[in-house]
Image: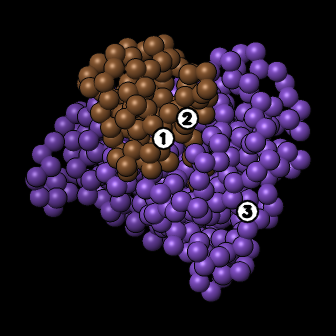
Amino acid sequence: MATTEPIELVKSRIEELDPADARAELERGDAVLIDTREQHEWDEAHLDGATLVPPTTVADRIESVVPDRSRRVLVYCRVGNRSARAVDALEELGYEDVASIDGGIVAWQQAGFPVVEPEGLTKEQRMRYSRHTLLPEVGVEGQLKLLNAKVLLVGAGGLGSPAALYLAAAGIGTLGLVDDDEVDESNLQRQVIHTTARVGEPKTESARASIEALNPDVEVVEHRTRLDADNILEIIEGYDVIVDGADNFPTRYLLNDASVRLRKPVVSASILAFDGQISTFVPYEGPCYRCLYPTPPPPELAPSCGAAGVLGVMAGVMGLLQANEVIKLVAGIGEPLIGRLLLYDSLGTRFTELKVKRDPECPICGEDAPEISPSEMGRFPDYEAFCGGTVVG
Amino acid sequence: MATVKIPPVLRAQTDGEPEVAAPGASVGEVLRALAATHPGTEAQIFSPEGELNRYVNVYLNDEDVRVRDGLDTPVSDSDTVVILPAMAGG
């Protein structure tokens, strides 16, 4: 097919139908309808009963779509140029009765004729998420998955702030926020979801205000509480993916034990000073947090950000890596960080990847792990100092 | 000599150095050599019985030495030993 040939010349030798005539033919049911645009254009809207055959695939695919070369075939694209060239090419391939719809789907819609629009995405959503739906890996289908997803953020602090903002922008349909803290001036150096004017407000409320201002599609669920053995199962049960941005070990171990029980994936990150760590724990598919860290370190080896300091940007880098993992898990694309621990050293700008294996003797997800009662979750029977002191971030 | 990567929480014991070169034919020997030059690291890496503390993860290159031969895992000069404690900052 000579695509460099002037379009007027091509059009002069093929049959073009205006939308009204095309519609009449289609209603009689004696023509095959071909859409020769790209997948992302098809996803936005297409004519009922059409089959998508993108321009570069016409020669290869037409035989399987229309085996009978004497059949009447109508072809359309956006405005009628690509379809004119496709008709020309089909005639060269021996198709005898082919026509292009003049003005394409644009003229069709201007004439007031109906099109099939993807279920679930409104006109505003198609516009808002167009840079997502353009990606073949995401598309409308992936965006619908994001819009239907329920993601819980444990901690609306350093990691939770950037993660929540970008997950909200990405159109995650429900964002749950667990935090019992209030916004403090010292948070604002990294907790970018909060504002100076909202110092003193509950973090969940402040985060809700930012999320709703960014994207009205997102439903925010506030859990203004601290996770404990009594409330955790009930809180996490309704979510698809959990983002662990907790500032203390007791919550991290508790969340691990409960999420393994309910088989919820957890995207876990932590930050301190200029360093960050992240991994994705999918119960029974890969290791859990306890496989990686069987025992929490003693307090002198586990200073909090409040005691040791943290570069604000670290929260952004690691929180966004978490958001990226969540989107991959929800959309079912890419390679999640399962069985891999990624370290980021911001002073050296170095990433290091370490392998993490499931521990067959893990007390929570190991082969012979006993069923534990909810009140035993998050505990360390052999580690008395642990439960005594809560590390505050 | 192998390179030992020192986590931020142990750098006070290594004069702030993020990496220390240490000799040894096994992970245990390398960590003992580190403890000999930087005595402050010893109690944080080794238990009183001389085993690795359970809360310290040690990797030879990208592999946890617990799935290899622990402190007996052989080390060559081009290897990197990573000491990694859990962090909880969020």
Visual hue assigned to chain B = brown
Q: Quadrant of residue A64?
A: top left
Task: Name the amino acid, label 1.
Answer: Gly
Q: CA distance from mark 2 to mark 3?
A: 36 Å
Q: CA distance from mark 1 to mark 2?
A: 7 Å
Q: Quadrant of residue A114?
A: bottom right
User: Quadrant of the image for the N terminus of chain A?
Assistant: top left
Coordinates of residue A102 in the picture (x, y in percent): 33, 61
Task: Name the amino acid, label 2.
Answer: Ala
Q: Residue at x 75, y 35 (%)?
A: A383
**On what subunit does the disc labeled 1 rest?**
B
Give the label on residue B40, or none. 1
Between A177 and A58, the one lying in front of the other is A177
The residue labelled by disc 2 is B43
Q: Are marks 1 and 3 in contact (CB under 8 Å)?
A: no
The local crowd at label 2, few if under 14, some if 14 to 19, many if 20 or more residues have their Cα within 10 Å, is few
Above or below A181: residue A12: above
The local crowd at label 3, few if under 14, some if 14 to 19, many if 20 or more residues have their Cα within 10 Å, is many
Above or below A27: residue B77: above
On screen, residue A210 versus residue A272, left or right, reads right
Q: Residue at x 60, y 63 (%)?
A: A306
Give the label on residue A179, or none. 3
> Is any atom of residue A151 visible in this view?
no
Q: Secondary structure at mark 2?
A: helix
Visual hue assigned to chain A = purple
Q: Are marks 1 and 2 in contact (CB under 8 Å)?
A: yes
Q: CA distance from mark 1 to mark 3?
A: 37 Å
